[in-house]
Amino acid sequence: MIRSLPEASNFSVPIDRMFDAMLVLCGAVALGVFVVMFWFCIKYRHGSDANREGRQSTKFGLEISWTLIPFLLFVGMFAWSINLWTLLRTPPADAKPIYVVAKQWMWKVQHPNGRREIDVLHVPLGVPVRLIMTSQDVIHSFYVPDFRVKQDVVPGRYTALWFTATKLGSYPLLCSEYCGTDHAAMTGTVKVVSREDYRRWLDESTALPPAKQGRQLFVQFGCSGCHDPGSGIRAPDLRGLYQSRVKLADGPTVTADDRYLHDAIMLPNTQRVAGYAPIMPTYQSRIDEEDVLALLAYIKSLEAGPSQQEGEHAQR
């Protein structure tokens, strides 16, 4: 097939191949239907000498063939698409995390060492990259046509997208979900650079890593007055909390993942921890999503205290 877009990621070729196969299959089925339809239209046109006695005959081989063959072909397409979708949703364990916050009308990016950029995303060539994304206001959609990847970015939750860039260069970044008056202007650039250039570009930054930024915000917002070990107010211990199991006041037990921690900060009374009074204030509309990401990075960096580790060994 003739390509109008570069194939610049690990997903470009398989997605293009599946699209080509689907186009050929649908075109072949449509062509077959129209060829038979026109043949009957010509053969049985008004005034033709075709036999119209209405004789009925059943050819089971033909009936089964035109039913099963298209069915199996489309089932094969479905299985192919499911396999590709699974690949799209399963990033490698070593994928580099990069945080993206969508906001009317810009893309705000933060790299693991704390370096930030707006409407530009630097990624290293040949390295799997996992984007962890959320929105500050309305639904946006992160779309890089040359990479054949697209993912909705939703307020109040985290969505993820991964890819491996395969060609050096600059590629357009678009928002493919109408998000307001300047939706068309919400554009950016994905810059694919060599690993050495990417490392050098990161080293030029003087920004604090997200975990250290989160610690500063943790103190600034007064969180340390309740959650630091030895504080005067009884609040859940955050050491070793990430990905642990948490018993809620209304009965169920949940995993303290990114979504849970986000809601615990922004909507603390929706999932209150068992045994604690509902005294934590909500931070919704008081801090933005970038601050939440920094706080999450700090909480993830906290290791379990000695008493928690002893408890875990006792449970084992």
Image (cartoon, rainbow, N blue to C red):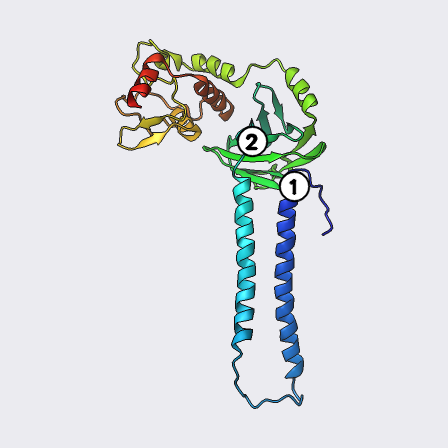
At 53% from the left and 46% from the top, the residue drawn is 83
The percent coordinates of residue 54 (x first, y second) are: 54, 88
Q: Is residue 247 left or right of residue 120?
A: left
At 50% from the left and 17% from the top, the residue drawn is 211
Amino acid on which disc 2 is placed: Arg
For the residue pair 11 and 265, the one nearer the viewer reads as: 11
The percent coordinates of residue 21 (x first, y second) are: 63, 55
Amino acid on which disc 1 is placed: Pro
Mark 1 neighbour class, 10 Å CA radius: few under 14, some 14 to 19, many 20 or more: some
Q: Quadrant of residue 236?
A: top left
At 34% from the left and 21% from the top, the residue drawn is 280
Q: Quadrant of residue 180?
A: top right
Locate the C terminus by quadrant: top left
Which residue lies under the disc numbered 2? 130
Instruction: Check residue 11 in the rendering and tell me which mark sits there, or answer none.
Output: none
The percent coordinates of residue 12 (x first, y second) are: 65, 42
Q: Is residue 46 left or right of residue 153?
A: right
What secondary structure is found at the residue carrying circle 1?
helix
Mark 2 neighbour class, 10 Å CA radius: few under 14, some 14 to 19, many 20 or more: many
Which residue lies under the disc numbered 1? 145
- Tally the marks: 2
